[in-house]
C-alpha cells in the first residue's frame, strides 16, 4: 500500500468514527456500540471511573489501547503534546494535571475529530488545551517546546513511524519524555493482512513487531527506552465483533486463522527520554 493511500483511508475511517461515534481500535473493539461500551473498554485498558467522570460527554469514543496519561508523571506547568488526539480524552485528563500554568496541544489530521474535540473543550471550559490540524509525521509544533509527548493507539496507523518519532524528538525539550500506548506484534503478520486497508484502520496491519518498534524509538535518538506495561488482546472480543468479522470475511480468513493472528497482537506502553 502507498503511504498517501493509507493516510487517506485512515483519515476517512476516523472521520466516520467522529461523526458516527463508532470505534475500531483497542484491545476489545467497541465498533458500533453504545457509549457505555466505550466506558467499559476504557476501564479495561486502565482508565478509572474518576477520570472518565471528569471529562466532557463525547470525549471518549473507546479509541485507545492504554492510558498514557496515568503513566506520564505529568506535573503542574508541563507542556504536553498528544499525537492523534481524537475527541480529546487524553488531552483533557492531561490538562487537569498540568493546571493553568501548563498547556496541552492535541494534534489530529482529521478535521471532523478536531471539530468534535474543540466542541468538547468548550463543554468543559478548558482554557489550557489547544487542538491543531496536522499529521504526526509533520507536527505543527516548535522545536524544543514540549516537556512530554503522549499518544494512544495512533502511531501504529502511521506508514512512516521513523518520521513520527523523529518529529517527536524534535519538539521535545532536552530532558523531555514520551509515554506512548500502542499496538505491536510478537511476529510479522501474513501478507494479506498487512495489505488490507480495513485491517490497517482497525489498528492491526499497520503494527510492527515489538523489537522493530523499540528500535525505531531508539533510532530517533531516545534513551532509557523500555516497555513498562504490556497487555494481550482478548481473542473473543475480536472473533465476536461485527467489524472484525467483516474483515476476516473479506480476506477469507477462518476463525482459527483469526485467533492465531490476534495472538500475535499486543498492547504496550513505551517510555523514552530525550537526553540533555
Image (cartoon, rainbow, N blue to C red):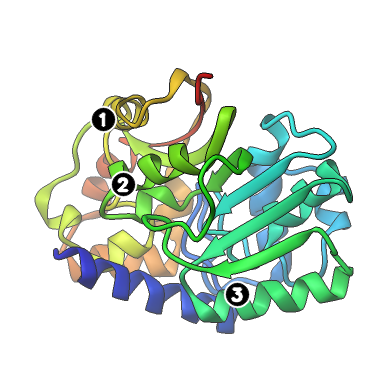
Question: Pointer 3: residues within 10 angstroms few (<14), some, or many (20+)?
Answer: many
Q: Nearer the viewer, mark 3 or mark 1?
A: 3
Per the image, label 3 sits on a secondary structure element best described as helix
Which numbered dot is residue 114?
A: 3
Q: Residue at x 64, y 52 (%)?
A: 41
Which numbered dot is residue 256?
A: none
Q: Does any portion of residue 233 appear in the rendered image?
A: no
Q: Residue 154: image x %, image y %?
A: 45, 53
Name the residue that disc number 1 marks: 212
Name the residue that disc number 2 marks: 163
Q: Residue 207: image x %, image y %?
A: 31, 45
Instruction: Give whichever of 158, 136 is nearer the camera.
Output: 136
In this view, 134 is above or below 191: below
- Which quadrant holds residue 209? top left
Per the image, label 1 sits on a secondary structure element best described as helix
Report the residue that reaches farthest toward the top.
Answer: 224
Q: Residue at x 29, y 52 (%)?
A: 206
Question: Pointer 2: residues within 10 angstroms few (<14), some, or many (20+)?
Answer: some
Amino acid at each position: 500500500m502507498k503511504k498517501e493511500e493509507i493516510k487517506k483511508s485512515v483519515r476517512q475511517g476516523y472521520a466516520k468514527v467522529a461523526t458516527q461515534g463508532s470505534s475500531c481500535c483497542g484491545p476489545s473493539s467497541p465498533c458500533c456500540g453504545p457509549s457505555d461500551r466505550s466506558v467499559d473498554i476504557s476501564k479495561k485498558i486502565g482508565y478509572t471511573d474518576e477520570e472518565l467522570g471528569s471529562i466532557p460527554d463525547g470525549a471518549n469514543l473507546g479509541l485507545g489501547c492504554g492510558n498514557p496519561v496515568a503513566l506520564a508523571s505529568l506535573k503542574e506547568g508541563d507542556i504536553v503534546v498528544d499525537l492523534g488526539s481524537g475527541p480529546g480524552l487524553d488531552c483533557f485528563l492531561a490538562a487537569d494535571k498540568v493546571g493553568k500554568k501548563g498547556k496541552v496541544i492535541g494534534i489530529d489530521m482529521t478535521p471532523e475529530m478536531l471539530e468534535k474535540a474543540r466542541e468538547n473543550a468548550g463543554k468543559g471550559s478548558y482554557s489550557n488545551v489547544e487542538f491543531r490540524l496536522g499529521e504526526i509525521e509533520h507536527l505543527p509544533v516548535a522545536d524544543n517546546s514540549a516537556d512530554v509527548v503522549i499518544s494512544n493507539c495512533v502511531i501504529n496507523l502511521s506508514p512512516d513511524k521513523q518520521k513520527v518519532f523523529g518529529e517527536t524528538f524534535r519538539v521535545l525539550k532536552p530532558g523531555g519524555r514520551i509515554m506512548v500506548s500502542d499496538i505491536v506484534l510478537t511476529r510479522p503478520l501474513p501478507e494479506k493482512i498487512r495489505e488490507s486497508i480495513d485491517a490497517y484502520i482497525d489498528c492491526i496491519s499497520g503494527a510492527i513487531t515489538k523489537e522493530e518498534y523499540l528500535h525505531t524509538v531508539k533510532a530517533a535518538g531516545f534513551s532509557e527506552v523500555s516497555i513498562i506495561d504490556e497487555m494481550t488482546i482478548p481473542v473473543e472480543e475480536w472473533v465476536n465483533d461485527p467489524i472484525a468479522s467483516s474483515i476476516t470475511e473479506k480476506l477469507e480468513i477462518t476463525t482459527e486463522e483469526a485467533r492465531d493472528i490476534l495472538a500475535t497482537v499486543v498492547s504496550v506502553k513505551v517510555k523514552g527520554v530525550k537526553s540533555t
